[in-house]
Image (spheres, grey):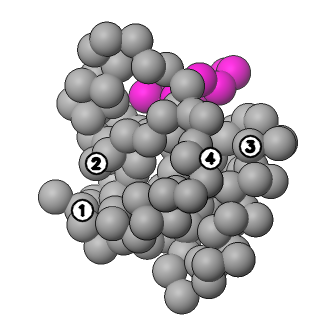
Amino acid sequence: MPYILYIEDNFENRLLVRRILTASGFDVEDVDNARDGIRIASSNPPDLILMDMSMPEMDGLTATLRLRENPALDDVAIVALTANVMEGDRETFLEAGCDGYISKPIDVDNFVDEISSYIGSRR
């Protein structure tokens, strides 16, 4: 069963994503801040990281850049899961090292298929 780390400061978003993905057979761990997410990913590399881009203290863009500095995470796909949908945001996240982009609010009907497409797809 694929292991997904979800880094998101909003409790309701974490709860929704965890429920959807665990119901589909994924092992999901979620954390409410980027620092803990980086620590957990570094000690137990997941199959996929879902990254909120707008968090206090350290944003998802900075966290992604830090995760990409760790060679142990080279094969781990990082997907931006964000409400940031301004022109150029997607490109900025991809340039920082994200492998994909899913906008919020999520499309519950297609979310599992989107996530599945990223498992094992790192560059």
Q: Residue placed at 61% from the left, 35% from the top?
A: 105
Is residue 54 rendered magenta in the image? yes
Label 4 residue SS: strand
Magenta-tinted stretch: 53-63
Q: Nearer the viewer, residue 96 or 99?
A: 99
Q: Earlier in the sequence, mark 3 or mark 1?
A: 3
Q: Tell me the distance, in whole angstroms, between the alpha carbons under discs 1 and 2.
A: 7 Å
In this orientation, does residue 59 appear?
Answer: no
Compared with 39, 119 (above or below) is below
Q: Earlier in the sequence, mark 3 or mark 2?
A: 3
Tell me the tag on residue 7. 4
Is residue 123 rendered magenta in the image? no
Mark toward the viewer: 3 or 1: 3
Q: Quadrant of residue 92?
A: top left
The three-letter amino acid code for the residue at tag 1 is Arg
Q: Residue furthest front?
A: 109
Mark toward the viewer: 3 or 2: 3
- Report which residue position mark 2 lands on: 99
Label 2 residue SS: loop
Compared with 104, 45 (above or below) is below
Residue 42, percent from left and from top: 49, 61
Label 3 residue SS: helix
Asked whether disc 1 touches disc 2, contact meaning CB atoms under 8 Å apart, the reply is yes
Q: Residue placed at 16% from the left, 58% from the top?
A: 123
- Report which residue position mark 1 lands on: 122
- Report which residue position mark 3 lands on: 13
Q: Earlier in the sequence, mark 3 or mark 4?
A: 4
Q: Residue placed at 28% from the left, 48% from the top?
A: 99
